[in-house]
Amino acid sequence: MHKFVDFNVPPFVGREIDYIQEAVKSKKISGDGTFTKKCSNWLENRFNAQKVLLTTSGSSALDMAFLLSGIKSGDEVIMPSYTFSSTANSAILAGANIVFVDIDPKTMNIDPDKVKKAITNRTKVICCVHYAGVACDMAKIMDIAKKNNLIVIEDAAQAVMASYKNKALGTIGDFGCYSFHETKNYSMGEGGALLINN
């Protein structure tokens, strides 16, 4: 007899129906209601983030980050070839050309040495993905970005509550993006957050 393990089990604490009823009674069930503000404030305080905007998904957070980066047609974005399609889609929607680089097999994250070699005069953004909550080498990435005047976007979809040198992932680069999809470590079924750090 085979026993199957669920891929993911969304967490429930037992008060969800009460909160839904409270939102319905307030007649504010879209964004920017009481719960949205509480969640944004909690994230800002917990992670010491300058500004947190809740989004409809992690993909929407990535879309906003790339658009806010001021990408123009022909600008290049360096990102790992090992990532989810949303990371690349968001850069393409903003008009960027993607330059994929390989990962460090020890961390499964973008290899900073390969990032350095991929930079051209058209590079605008480095997008790092903290795969499975494991931090990229942010010291090296931020140093490369500073020396080359580049924007850093952290795809921290799987990294809520993870950190690098006591700093929350998503708060180190110019923008951080979280996902609250059912399969992530913090879930609300769907949803995400954009952390604006610069």
Image (cartoon, rainbow, N blue to C red):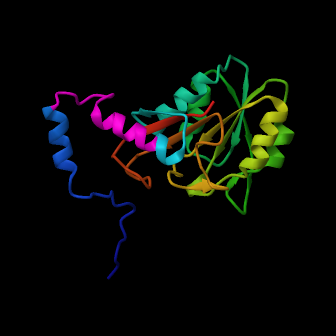
Quadrant in the picture for residue 180:
top left
Residue furthest toward the bottom?
1
Q: Which residues are magenta?
A: 26-43
Membership of 34 in magenta stretch: yes
**Which residue is at the front of the view, 145 or 88?**
145
Residue at image position (62%, 41%) is 154
Q: Is residue 178 visible?
A: yes
Q: Residue 28, how many percent across, how many down?
A: 22, 28
Q: Residue 60, how many percent across, how many down?
A: 47, 31
Seen in the image, is 30 located left or right of residue 95?
Answer: left
Which quadrant holds the N terminus? bottom left
Residue at image position (65%, 19%) is 70
Quadrant in the picture for residue 39:
top left
**Which residue is at the front of the view, 37 or 30?**
37
Seen in the image, is 196 located left or right of residue 73?
Answer: left
Q: Residue 91, how many percent across, how many down?
A: 61, 29
Which quadrant holds the C terminus? top right
